[in-house]
Image: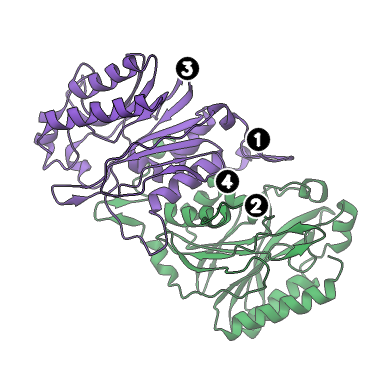
Chain colours: A purple, B green
Amino acid sequence: MGAVDDNLIALRAALADALAADAGIVVATELAGSGYAFADAEEARAHAEDLDGPTVSAYRDASQAGGGAVVVGGFCERGDDGNTYNSAVAVEAGEVLAVYRKLHLWHDEQSCFTPGAEVPPVVETHHGRIGVAICYDLEFPEVTRSLALRGADLLALPTNWPRTVVPPGERSMLGTLAMATARLSRTFVAVCDRAGAERGVDYEGASIIAGPDGYPLAESTDPLASQVLTATADLAHARDKRTGPRNDVVTDRRPDLY
Amino acid sequence: MGAVDDNLIALRAALADALAADAGIVVATELAGSGYAFADAEEARAHAEDLDGPTVSAYRDASQAGGGAVVVGGFCERGDDGNTYNSAVAVEAGEVLAVYRKLHLWHDEQSCFTPGAEVPPVVETHHGRIGVAICYDLEFPEVTRSLALRGADLLALPTNWPRTVVPPGERSMLGTLAMATARLSRTFVAVCDRAGAERGVDYEGASIIAGPDGYPLAESTDPLASQVLTATADLAHARDKRTGPRNDVVTDRRPDLY
């Protein structure tokens, strides 16, 4: 918090690391440039930026440097309506494909942001169709299922998950939710979670990339360390919704009864 | 398969073991009396029974012997319409509270059963409100969310989950789905899964009881062994949907946008 220039340097470096690892799709954390633990709405507003601002510019630049990479990342948005939003952007080859304003606000975000009023987007990219949601949205199966039914091959979730108590031998519930979300609709799910601490808020640091079978393709090994997780994923696999010779998680639905 | 009398003896013994362990709510497997791996519709029809049949009678008797216990278990139902259903019954103190006919049929069940035409029920019992679904239904968040929103404190799922390939160090995806389902709506979830093998079908044997925080309260330790899993659960905890001082998984929903 409060060291935006340093944050942006670190963000650009992390994006460059991911691109150097040949990433075609990169997901960054929620509110990556500004930090998360705002004291109040005024402080959030002071960090808000539009689509030409420094955080989105970092995403745009990275997506161009990557020769057509897709970057999904969070930023503190100054809306043209004057409101402050906890938003994520999806960019490809320097172009903004979609801006999503978080629908479900966690804890003190409610004091700092206006909740979004539109459903999360699914964007068509050269690497597949990507659904964008943010952190706490993952707890609403209405949202994640909708993204999958609207064609998302990958759900990309910039996340800042405050640290929870995890029983010995278990993974963070964030990981379990990401895995189940992936498995239920046979999509890929990529959660980029914040690590370390900030103004007394400890983060889970539980980034994960899960495949359509639900199991992790890559997973954070250290809640305190900044890491670049990579996985090789053919997003076309997410278009095969079969779970067996006679079953399909989409066509087996009974929408007349839901 | 084919040893119904032995199955019923084993089922009655397992129910008695659970009641001897002071269970107020007991969940048995899917198609507990008949077995699961029917060759065809004709064989399933030959094993179908009505609410006075031997499997439901075992559940009714157990619920009376338990001095008011609730039993949820699966049976092969002969409907009054002449169709064969993969059903579950919820009984309390000898009385049938609800019959549920499985909505989503897995694999060769499609050759043997007529799919249900009504949403899964939530029954009010002396031990709390119980939502009933069966096995593959767990893969449809539309169903599990609906049960929770209609007031279920506990989701009880008789299950016969065919064996899957589980990566080393991971639990069965059945367990992960049960945990995420519990956590997303802050309910208890009890999955009674078949163990062992039958006519060449290996079962997962991955029974689990998960609490509203998503973590297991009890979990199968052996996919081959018949086990009685018990957990102490105050179902009233499932009525507290808060996940933080300012958050609630039900009231934070944005139904205008789903």
The amino acid type found where label 4 is placed reads Phe
Which residue is painted at 39% across and 21% down in the image? A70
Q: CA distance from mark 3 to mark 1?
A: 26 Å
Q: Nearer the viewer, mark 1 or mark 2?
A: 2
* B43 lies left or right of B123: right
Marks 4 and 1 share the same chain: no
Element carrying mark 3: loop
The amino acid type found where label 1 is placed reads Thr
Q: Position of residue A142 (x, y in %)?
A: 46, 40
Q: Nearer the viewer, mark 2 or mark 4?
A: 2
Direction front: furthest residue? A20
Which residue position is annotated with label 1? A251
Which residue position is annotated with label 4? B140
Quarter of the picture containing the C terminus of chain B is top left
Characterize the local packing of mark 2: few (<14), some (14-19) or many (20 or more) Cα atoms within 10 angstroms: few
Q: CA distance from mark 1 to mark 2?
A: 21 Å
Which residue position is annotated with label 3? A126
Residue B155 visible in rendering: yes
Which residue is painted at 73% across and 67% down in the image? B32
Q: Are marks 3 and 1 in contact (CB under 8 Å)?
A: no
Which residue position is annotated with label 2? B164
Please tell me whether residue B49 is drawn above or below residue B69 in the rendered image: above
Q: Chain of mark 2?
A: B
Please tell me whether residue A194 is drawn above or below residue A12 in the rendered image: below
Q: Position of residue A65 (x, y in %)?
A: 32, 16
Q: Chain of mark 1?
A: A
Marks 3 and 4 share the same chain: no
